[in-house]
Image (cartoon, rainbow, N blue to C red):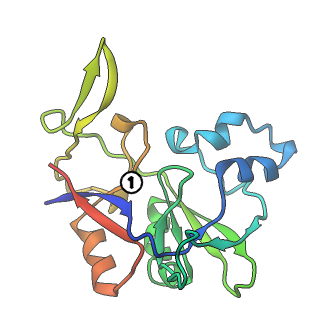
Amino acid sequence: MSFYALERDGYEYLFLDLTKRDVLRRAPRDKDLEFDDVMKFSQSSRPMKDWWPELETTLRANEDIVSPKMPDLSIWSGGAALVLYPRGYRLLGDWLSQFGELLPVKVMNQSDPCWIFNCRAKKDVDPEKSSWEYVDDMPLHIESIGFTDSEDDPVIFKTDFDNCSFLYCGERFKAAVVEMGLEGVSFRGLY
């Protein structure tokens, strides 16, 4: 089986104007949340649904795009998370909820919310296919990353190897996105 890194596809798409700092500012004060509970949510894999604040934001376009397109999915800049826009949520929401949690975000001038998919599923890398480049005993960047196929693979996941910074998937997720004609993410093949 092949594995893929999910990446943002296309400069011409709208994106959710929401950062982790925005979430932190609106997080409830009575839940004993620490700074890292929000800022490092991908690494900690802690659930956020029980304290997720009511958020409202806008969709933005890159400033030189005259007619931006609405994506179905996109990568949230906040971490190893997806943004599901209304069509993406309708088609993938139930399936993805098995591998993480869906967190609502109201969007001004839109009837339907967007949903941030906080991926909580993890998979270990194949050490034979994965390596870092080091400079003076400090990791500089990932040279290669790969996974071994397993019966119980989640359809979408993150890995501790890259500090849970990116989302990965196998053939099933990629095939579903392509078959449904969902736009906004691309798939970069891995080792």
122 or 109: nearer the viewer: 109
Farthest residue, direction top: 136
Q: Is residue 19 above or below residue 92?
A: above
Q: Residues within 10 Å of mark 1 (few under 14, many from 20)?
A: many
- Rendered location of residue 143, percent (x, y): 22, 36
Identify the residue at image location x=43%, y=42%. 164
In this image, 120 relative to 133: left or right? right
134 or 84: nearer the viewer: 134
Name the quadrant of the N terminus: bottom left
Q: Secondary structure at mark 1?
A: loop
Identify the residue at image location x=65%, y=64%. 17
Identify the residue at image location x=58%, y=39%. 40
Label tally: 1
- Rendered location of residue 134, percent (x, y): 27, 21
Farthest residue, direction front: 64
Residue 123's image quarter?
Answer: top left
In this image, 169 relative to 112: left or right? left
Identify the residue at image location x=29%, y=17%. 135
* Residue under pointer 1: 167
- Rendered location of residue 48, percent (x, y): 65, 52
Q: Is residue 167 above or below residue 131?
A: below
In this image, 45 relative to 106: left or right? left
Q: Is residue 138 above or below residue 156?
A: above
- Rendered location of residue 63, percent (x, y): 58, 70
As shown in the figure, which amino acid type bears the numbered disc 1?
Leu
Farthest residue, direction right: 30
10 or 72: nearer the viewer: 10
